[in-house]
Image (cartoon, coloured by chain):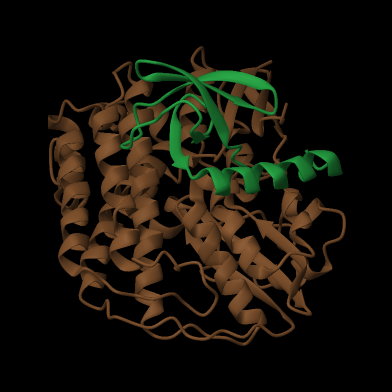
Amino acid sequence: MCMAVPSRVVAIDGTVATVEAFGQQRQTSLMLLAEDVAIGDYLILGAGGNFAAEKVPQEAALEALAYLSQVLADGQA
Amino acid sequence: MFPEARLDVALRVRDGIVADVAVRSTRLVQASRLFAGRRPDEVLTLLPTIFALCGTAQVLAGLSATEQASGLPPSAAQLPARQMLLLAETVAEHGLTLARDWPAHVGAEPDLAAARRIKTAMASIRPALFPAGDWNHPGGGTVAPQHPAIAVAIAAARAALTSLLDADIAAIVAGPDQFRAWVNTSRCAAARLIAEASDDALAGFGRGPFLPMPEQGPADLSARLEGERDGDYLARPDSAGRVFETGPLARQAWHPVVAALIGAHGPGLLARLAARLVEVASSLQEMDELVQSLDADHAPLACLVDGSGLGLVEAARGLLAHRVELEGGRVKRYQILAPTEWNFHPDGPLARGLRGMPATADLQRRAALLVGALDPCVACSVTVE
């Protein structure tokens, strides 16, 4: 399944953000986003992760992360 | 870390042809299993974040399954509003492919500004239809269509596509002659890619036995989902041994432009690329027509009862199926079958199309083009062994 992992922005350098999810950091382009992004925001990355696809509200991101933690613990991942 | 879902396609060459195709998937096809025990509205809130790439289609399939399970048909006014959301996502997803991915295939810079314009315009439709944000409520949300804003959004996406493609997309796919003329004269990246794919050697690359997905899905879909226990069907679906192709080519094979290309070259790379352009044009046209049928509607009082339901949605990449069983106001079982599982099945259209193809020096690139034309919803690598 094409699951999206909400990733928290930990640094921004121009149009590139460093994001973190499940202890892993990666860089992603903010070029496809219309809205402003700040450190602490949660982003959904597109397939492959090179581009951020969407900013999601913190509450929705935390709920999704809690669910994905269960998936991981359940051994479905 | 959370493992990244991906596909790896390995081509084994023998005697100058692709003798075997191995498709390995790490997609989490059973992740929806853990929806069990949650309330349906919780699931419908989680879906668009967890499956963000086609989040609208996921919610619409979930709504349809939940409503069917509860014997709760949405009112007549909800249907055009939902169809509008679905088409907006299809245009945004295909637009992203045309603006970001196609230029890379011909060594051009992606047009991220155009991609952003299309995406932003399409994203503005949901709040212009369901300002209360309750579009994901079983039975339907409060529809309060702002017709002018929706018309402006459609026009903005069309304008961004026109700048991307050097011409109005409806005119490009008006007929086989118009399509050919655009391919031969435009210097935009999309036309250059299609010009390259029009070469005899490439046009039919990836043509295999063409098994388009039936319009309402395979006849045994519901029964197979119901009987599924170990995740095998969700990972590698079939119908009496047949693995269908789903997505733009299956849906648009009747269109004169696509039909002419299938007739000349078979259901290969060129027909699949053209089908995506045709689908963007037809989606925008359907959106134009739908604007007139959007009426205001109240959110009904929905009462969910026990039962099981199957929700089918034609998402950007193909048929998306959700099946739900409800018991005591909670989800007892939740299954999702996504289009990528059909198209990238070990015996599906990609594998069938690649088997027997000549092992030319540029085989890896050709195969990557075919993968792109079939548009998996996760990253996909191609190796030649």
The x, y position of residue B348, in whole percent, is 64, 46
The relative height of residue B52 versus residue B58 in the rendered view (above or below) is above
Residue under the point 43% across and 51% down: B249
Q: Nearer the viewer, residue B251 or B290?
A: B290
Q: Is residue B264 visible?
A: no
Residue B247 percent coordinates (x, y): 48, 52
Q: Say which residue appears at 12% left-offset and 41% top-offset.
A: B167
Query: In x, y percent, where is residue B57?
Result: 50, 58
Q: State the image coordinates of residue B68 (x, y, percent, origin top left).
A: 61, 80
Report the front residue among B131 and B276.
B131
Q: Nearer the viewer, residue B381 or B78?
A: B78
Q: Quadrant of residue B38?
A: bottom right
Q: Can you say whether B363 is above or below B125 in the image?
A: above
Colour of chain A in the rendered structure image: green
Q: Quadrant of the C terminus of chain B?
A: top right
What is the quadrant of residue B239 in the picture? Answer: bottom right
Chain in brown?
A: B
> Which of the 4 image quadrants contains residue B192?
top left
Q: Quadrant of the N terminus of chain B?
A: top right
Residue at 61 percent across and 68 percent down: it is: B41
Is B201 situated left or right of B287 in this image? Answer: right
The image shows residue B308, relative to residue B227, as above or below, that is below
